[in-house]
Image: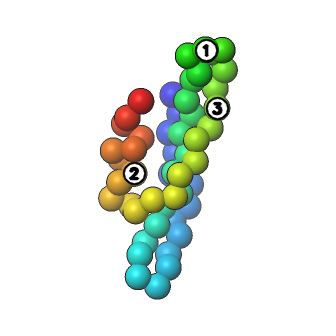
Amino acid sequence: MAKKVVATLQTSTKKLTKAIKMVKSPKTGAYTFVEKVMNGDEVDAWLKEK
């Protein structure tokens, strides 16, 4: 499973990160990409969860 942090977005008060991970569908076996913009501290936990 590929994991990658793509961009760091900065607003006036918060530093946000856009993370993308590749997830395999249990139904079809195809891979899809899931993108999420979140606080930089939450990225590792999000990438580790299934």
State the residue at coordinates (51%, 28%).
Answer: 1
| Label 2 Cα neighbours within 10 Å, binned few <14 / some 14-19 / many ≥20 | some
Give the labeled residue for mark 2: 43
* Structural distance between the alpha carbons of marks 3 and 1: 12 Å
Badge number at residue 1: none
The percent coordinates of residue 40 (x first, y second) are: 39, 61
Within-10-Å neighbours for mark 1: few <14, some 14–19, many 20+: few
Of marks 2 and 1, the one in the foreground: 1
Which quadrant would the C terminus be assigned to in this image? top left
- The residue that appears at 55% across and 30% down in the rendered structure is 23
Measuring 33% from the left and 44% from the top, which residue is drawn there?
45
In the rendered image, the vertical position of residue 20 relative to residue 12, given as above or below: above
For marks 3 and 1, give the one nearer the viewer.
1
In the image shown, does 29 or 8 lie closer to the viewer? 29
Numbered disc 3: secondary structure: strand
Residue 27, labelled with which disc? 1
**Residue 41 position in % (x across, y down):** 33, 59
The amino acid type found where label 1 is placed reads Lys
Name the spot of residue 5 as percent of width and height, x first: 51, 51
Count neighbours of disc 3 (C-alpha within 10 A) and say few if under 14, some if 14 to 19, many if 20 or more.
few
Element carrying mark 1: loop
* Residue 36 location (% of width, % of height): 53, 52
Q: Which residue is mark 3?
A: 32
